[in-house]
Image (cartoon, rainbow, N blue to C red):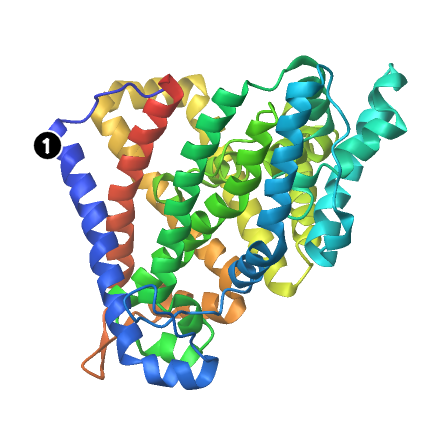
Amino acid sequence: MPLQLELLPQWEFYLYIVLSFGFHFYSFYEVFLISREYEEELDQAFDLETDTMFWGFKKDPMDFEWTFWMEWGRGYILWLLFCHSIVSQISSLWLKKRGWYGSENEYYLLIFTLTVRCLYCTSFSLEYCWSKQKMHHSFLWMLLYVFYYPVLHNGPIITFDDFHKQMTSQDSGGLKSNLGIFIWGTVRIFLWWWLAELMIHLMYMHAIYSSPSHLQAVNYWALDGLALAQVLFFYVKYLVLFGVPALVIQMDGLKPPTLPRCVSTMYSFSGMWRSFDVGLHHFLIRYIYIPMGGSRCNMFKMLLSTAITFAFVSYWHGSHNYLWSWAVLNWFGITAENGVKRLVSLPGVHDFISHFLSTRAHQRLHAALASVSTTLLIFSNLIFLGGHEVGRIYWNRIFWEGKNISNHRVHNCWPWATLSVFGFLYCYAHVGIRWQQIYSRD
């Protein structure tokens, strides 16, 4: 059922925005306070890093991926990407046809590089099997695609069909145009990097997640703030990790996958998968979901296709136990959302809803259902980022026991804790729905 813009009164929509931002900032403030309260204990347990750049606040070093790539970036990768850009720009000035760009394989990063290269090799191999014009899939094209340096270590994912089309049809921009892209892109990446560093200097969410006793002891505002901070840091982190190679790709005259959309505006599992890692989503749809049957087959094959897709993602990420739990939750969420969409699209149900609900009531119902989906989405992502223990603590404290700690006293808050979460996510859903409407219209 398509929704129209401007369905809700302006005052109501602005109220949802104020409540959404207010919840973000106040819960982050609580995380800041408990980070200061537990700073000495966390420092002894996890060796917080001293950093004078952010007003003397110590830095939470427990996010392995961010620390790993920052060290490599400062040491080698940024310089290699810069050298690649220089070679690319000189080649575009002196060579009218695209040349073969060198890839510095000596800085091969085993785990991250191999996992991403597996996807690239899979994409090329399947496109080769499907293609009738084998000359477009030569050994040299395979080398250029698989070892294209800007995406060598960590992506983003570009399928071979997109890569080949762009390499053979697009010309790189002029030096002046590329200089503007470089300056603006560098400024944005620096701001994202600064925001990520600021978050881990002010809020020790990764260290607290690594200490279950501290996570159990915080109050509900801090507990919810830690969840928001964790998923938002993951979003900002990938703006940097994907933004740097995306900038180089743009300067090469190619179009990189769209950068992740802010997780605070996502209100569904399907939207999360479509809008966060766009390149990986395109890969999964093209090479796994559709070949296995996709949505055009019967219900059983569609469920099987979705299950196999998530099984592949879980296996590709390392096949740990918590990843299978995350995959099951995502499969259930996607299945439930598709089931509701099919149900409300039935003529009888659609006519019933249209007859008894106004357009504004319709949107409020949509947001109410989306709040349930968003709750499960955040819960699944907390398992992905923190493991089973973090998921268990959140499940017990929010959905099962409802115990809140205030002034070192335990209070039974069930079901108000659960209803409060749904209430705030109801506001988030309204903001996300409006964002999606504007984004789709543009």
Task: Name above or below for residue 24 compared with residue 83.
Answer: below
Horizontally, residue 153 falls left or right of residue 223, namely right
Q: In the rendered image, which residue does mark 1 sit on?
A: 11
Please identify the quarter of the rendering in which residue 53 is found. Answer: bottom left
- Towards the viewer: 259 or 361: 259
Residue 289 percent across, percent down from the top left: 68, 33
**Which image quadrant for residue 253?**
top right
Point out residue 78 in the picture as x, y percentages from the top left corner. Answer: 57, 48
Seen from this angle, which residue lies furthest left?
A: 11
Residue 277 in which image quadrant: top right
Where in the figure is residue 262, as x and y percent of width and height? 39, 41
> Dot 1 surroundings within 10 Å: few (below 14), some, or many (20 or more)?
few
Tell me: 433 left or right of 129: left
What residue is rendered at 60% in x and 58% in y?
75
Q: Position of residue 366 (x, y in %)?
A: 32, 33
Q: Residue at x 64, y 64 (%)?
A: 321
Front position in the image: 307 or 13: 13
The amino acid type found where label 1 is placed reads Trp
On the rendered image, what quadrant is the N terminus found in? top left
Q: Quadrant of the C terminus?
A: top left
Residue 340 position (above or below residue 353) = below
Per the image, label 1 sits on a secondary structure element best described as helix
Q: Is residue 195 above or below residue 358?
A: below
Is residue 64 among the parts visible in the rendering?
Answer: yes
